[in-house]
Image (cartoon, grey):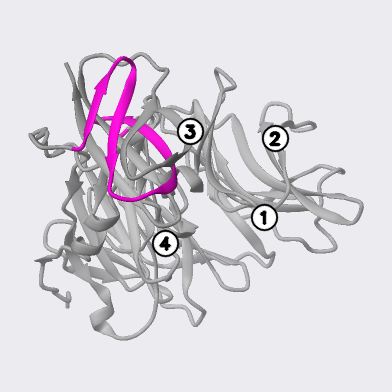
Amino acid sequence: MRTKFIVLAVAILLAAFSQLRAIPDVPTLQVDTLVDLSKTGGGEAGGALFLPDGNIIAIWKSIPHVIDSKTGEVIRRMDTIKASPLNYPRITKNGLRFGAISEGIKLKIWDVPTGKLLFQPKNSIYDFCFSPDGTKLYGALSNEKDNPGTIVVYDMATFEEIERLSFTSVTWGGPIDISPDGQTLAVSVGYKINDTFNNKFILINLNDKQNYTSIESLKLQINSMEFSPDGNQVSFLYNGSDDLYIYIYNLETKEKKYIRKAELSVLFGGANIAAIGKPKFIDSNHIYSGFKDGTGKLWYSFSWNIPENRIKNYFDFLGPVSVGVNDSILLFCNGAGVIGITNKKAVPVKDIIVPKENNITYKNNQLEYFSNKPFIGESYLYDINGKLIAYLGTQLFKSGNNTIPVNHPILNGVYLLTIISDTEYISKKFMVE
């Protein structure tokens, strides 16, 4: 018997969210709650993905559930396993096989049509991916004595081990993904320098498995790995000792782009960012992420326009552990078991309103700003879409009129000046005519 859940709409912490938004003309997309799995009891959700038929497969506790994407009904549950909660779900392109990893780094593979648990390898697998044709499984083995720097390959028909890809200079495996054409693996691997472990972002050409291309060496941990849908970019989350950022690498142009913690803090009104979420490609031009504030209680979600290097829109959904996407719908799942959806193409448009009375003007290639008190602050200039145009530097603001040199050509239009200090956060629109 199928279990039915009430479909309801929810807007989570909109008041707190609005207070931190520095770009007032970037729209917020409403995320509607499709189903709340937590009503079945305590536990944690490990993520959700779309099936090829448009329905959803979601992990609640240690059980994958198939959910109707229109009604929120749980259609059926797959085989139950007595294990710790599952995470990091992946599905083959044809939707026939589904995998996830439980604590203890143990991989499980299910047959989606029957719900049967098919495979549990003995090896501890840190991360995995399926080949695009669904015939192979690539697993990055965890750091154990008998498999340093090893990627194991299984046949998906027999689940027999086919081969291992090993590199003598590598000590352990990490996040892994495969290109849409099945020709390249992007992997985070570890290596040792003077007994200190470091990370390396590498590419492995599967037509030449004896060597790899090292893209960049990093001091600490890479937390995710994903190819863009067109296969031209790779993104991951880097958690360094003195920096935290989303890294986007273009395989064609070799260009590297970053969405840094400091930049996000400015865009969100000087927010104290404690953690950034793993990025997820919405399409090849847009990436999803979010961040948790310093209290650890609030989560702010957004999509980022990669070519234009700016925020495209915000989402009113709290703390996703995974984000799925099909042609028109974004799918969110948080650790509490709430699954939400929104139409990614239906972006609301807000009118641009410039206050008639404002204490900021632009003329002679400089901004004139009136302050009620003295302080030292940093100034940033954005266009109305939230794209950073220029960093205008740090200066002492006095009580009364202040001049901020722009030294950057500005066309006619509406802009946003943001000023940040230890005690002040100011964000004001102005018009250039």
Q: Which mark identifies residue 105?
A: none
Spatial distance from mark 2 to mark 3, Cα to Cα?
30 Å
Q: Which of marks 2 and 1 is nearer the N terminus?
A: 2
> Which residues, given as a range, are shown in magenta?
359-386
The local crowd at label 3, few if under 14, some if 14 to 19, many if 20 or more residues have their Cα within 10 Å, is few
Q: Please, what secondary structure does the residue beneath circle 1 have?
A: loop
Q: Which of marks 2 and 3 is in front?
A: 3
Q: Please, what secondary structure does the residue beneath circle 3 have?
A: strand
Q: Is residue 369 left or right of residue 189?
A: left
Q: Which mark identifies residue 393?
A: 3
Q: In which quarter of the image is residue 416?
A: top left
Q: Where is residue 127 in the image (x, y as percent from the top left)?
A: 59, 55
Which SS type dominates the magenta stretch? strand
Q: Nearer the viewer, mark 1 or mark 3?
A: 3
Q: Nearer the viewer, residue 344 or 430?
A: 430
Location of mark 2 (residue): 216
Q: Which mark identifies residue 292?
A: 4
Q: Which of 164 and 359 is in front in this view?
A: 359
Q: Nearer the viewer, mark 3 or mark 4?
A: 3
Q: Please, what secondary structure does the residue beneath circle 2 have?
A: strand
Q: Which of 87 and 193 is in front in this view?
A: 193
Q: Which residue is drawn at 37% across and 42% down?
A: 419
Determine if residue 22 is in view. yes
Spatial distance from mark 4 to mark 2, Cα to Cα?
27 Å
Q: Which amino acid does label 1 sit on?
A: Ser
Q: Which amino acid does label 3 sit on?
A: Gly
Determine if residue 325 is in view. no
Q: How many marks?
A: 4
Location of mark 1 (residue): 241
